[in-house]
């Protein structure tokens, strides 16, 4: 279901099931992360998940012993840039340059915490916290020195926004 051209990504991040390696598992679960830049794409993916869940690919299919339960929640709307959020971004990048901090811009695929506040009509910037590598993995590391850098950037940004 992943389609990089349209920005839709699907990742089965956790799969659990079974009791022993030489038995048929009585149950299994998969936890899936779905990211999409437009709400319609999320709804279409949800429908595709439903189609997949309604088609059990196991033998014997008609035994009645195999069931599929699912819980699908599109709880993070896509974070669509706005004039206001673009303004905040450019202001933060300009302040960063003055402080010797080059802020990059990357696309998270639409599933950030900031998408919740942005959807509520609040211009939102993401990722102004600690810098590091390996986000959301067991290799995640934070650069301690970036705590001071990001605190300085945030303080100046807040002060300048308050003065507007």
Image (cartoon, helix red, strand yellow):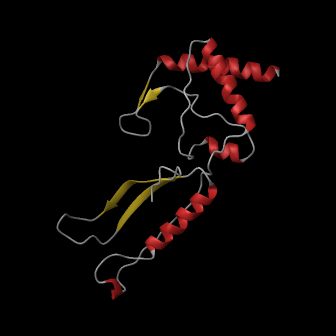
* Residue 162, position as x, y percentages in the image: 79, 23
Quarter-wise, where is residue 85 in the image?
A: top right
Q: Residue at x 34, y 69 (%)?
A: 27
* 91 vs 52: above or below: above
Q: Residue at x 59, y 49 (%)?
A: 37
* Residue 42, position as x, y percentages in the image: 57, 58
* Residue 146, position as x, y percentages in the image: 51, 19
Quick one: quadrant of the C terminus? Answer: top right
Q: Nearer the viewer, residue 31 or 40?
A: 40
Count the labels in the image.
0
* 159 vs 140: above or below: above
Query: Farthest residue toward the front?
Result: 5
* 161 vs 8: above or below: above
Quarter-wise, where is residue 100 in the image?
A: top right
Q: Nearer the viewer, residue 57 or 75?
A: 57
Quick one: quadrant of the N terminus? Answer: bottom left
Q: Residue at x 60, y 51 (%)?
A: 76
Left or right: where 157 falls relative to 47: right
Quarter-wise, where is residue 160 in the image?
A: top right
Left or right: where 74 falls relative to 135: right
* Residue 54, position as x, y percentages in the image: 45, 76
Query: Farthest residue toward the right?
Result: 164
């Amino acid at each position: 279901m992943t389609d990089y051209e349209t920005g839709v990504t699907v990742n089965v991040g956790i799969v659990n099931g079974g009791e022993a390696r030489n038995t048929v598992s009585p149950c299994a679960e998969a936890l899936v992360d779905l990211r999409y830049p437009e709400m319609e794409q999320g709804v279409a993916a949800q429908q595709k998940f439903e189609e997949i869940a309604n088609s059990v690919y196991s033998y014997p299919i008609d035994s009645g012993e195999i069931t599929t339960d699912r819980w699908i929640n599109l709880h993070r709307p896509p974070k669509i840039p706005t004039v206001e959020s673009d303004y905040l971004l450019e202001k933060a990048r300009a302040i960063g340059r003055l402080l010797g901090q080059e802020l990059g811009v990357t696309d998270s695929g639409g599933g950030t915490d900031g998408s919740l506040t942005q959807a509520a009509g609040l211009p939102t910037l993401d990722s102004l916290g600690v810098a590091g590598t390996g986000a959301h993995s067991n290799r995640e590391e934070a650069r301690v020195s970036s705590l001071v850098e990001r605190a300085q950037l945030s303080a100046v940004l807040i002060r300048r926004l308050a003065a507007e």
